[in-house]
Image: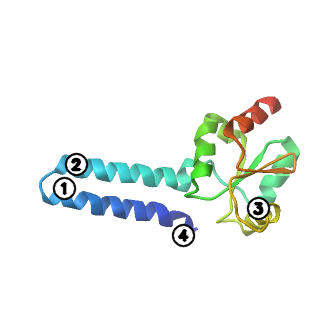
Amino acid sequence: MRRTWVLPALLVLCGAAAATGPALRGGTGTAVVYLLLFVLLAGVCSPLVFPRSLGAAQARARGAADGRPVVYWRPGCTYCLRLRLRLGRRARQVYWVNIWRDGAGAAQVRAVNDGNETVPTVFVAERPYTNPDPRWLREQLTSRS
């Protein structure tokens, strides 16, 4: 769990460091802007942006029962973030598995990606798709509704 918060914590620390210089020179407004930008970036890179993650076994079982896609992701992954943001509200219709929190999920991703933990890996009807186009996934969600 700690590993998922390393990047956001580093971004907040970098923001504090970047804001220190302007704050010491009397540029309070600039310091606040720096700090807010880094905090916003840390929030985007954190697990908070993603819907609640399930375990791989639970997500696969639910996906098999109702036909929803399962997305394997990890915090700090820009492609995962792009997928999440482009799905918008529809992201809640997908089951998310954080591979840094679930060893079985990481193993499943490695099994379909030649031993690499390439994310996002999406399973639709038990078929894997590595880093699919968000538009394609939205269409899959629309066709299942």
Q: Which residue is mark 2?
A: 30
Q: Could you tell which of marks 2 and 1 lies nearer the N-terminus?
A: 1
SS state under label 3? helix
Spatial CA span between label 2 and label 3: 43 Å
Specify few, some or many for label 4: CA neighbours under 10 Å numbering under 14, 14-19, or 20 or more. few
Name which residue lies at 79% across and 65% down: 114
Q: Could you tell which of marks 3 and 1 lies nearer the N-terminus?
A: 1
Per the rendering, the mark at residue 120 is none
Q: Position of residue 60 (x, y in %)?
A: 82, 54
Q: Is residue 19 left or right of residue 44?
A: left
Say which quadrant the C terminus sits in. Answer: top right
SS state under label 4? helix
Hey, which residue is sitting farthest front in the picture?
114
Q: Which residue is mark 1?
A: 22
SS state under label 2? helix
Q: Could you tell which of marks 4 and 2 lies nearer the N-terminus?
A: 4
Spatial CA span between label 2 and label 1: 6 Å
Q: Which residue is mark 3?
A: 109
Q: Could you tell which of marks 1 and 4 lies nearer the N-terminus?
A: 4
Q: Nearer the viewer, mark 4 or mark 3?
A: 3
Spatial CA span between label 4 and label 2: 31 Å
Whether the residues at callouts 3 and 1 have beta carbons within 8 Å, the answer is no
Spatial CA span between label 4 and label 3: 21 Å
The kind of residue on which mark 2 rests is Thr
Q: Which residue is mark 4?
A: 2
Spatial CA span between label 1 and label 4: 31 Å
Name which residue lies at 55% across and 64% down: 4
The kind of residue on which mark 3 rests is Val
Specify few, some or many for label 3: CA neighbours under 10 Å numbering under 14, 14-19, or 20 or more. many
The kind of residue on which mark 4 rests is Arg
Q: Could you tell which of marks 4 and 3 lies nearer the N-terminus?
A: 4
Q: Position of residue 103 (x, y in %)?
A: 73, 69
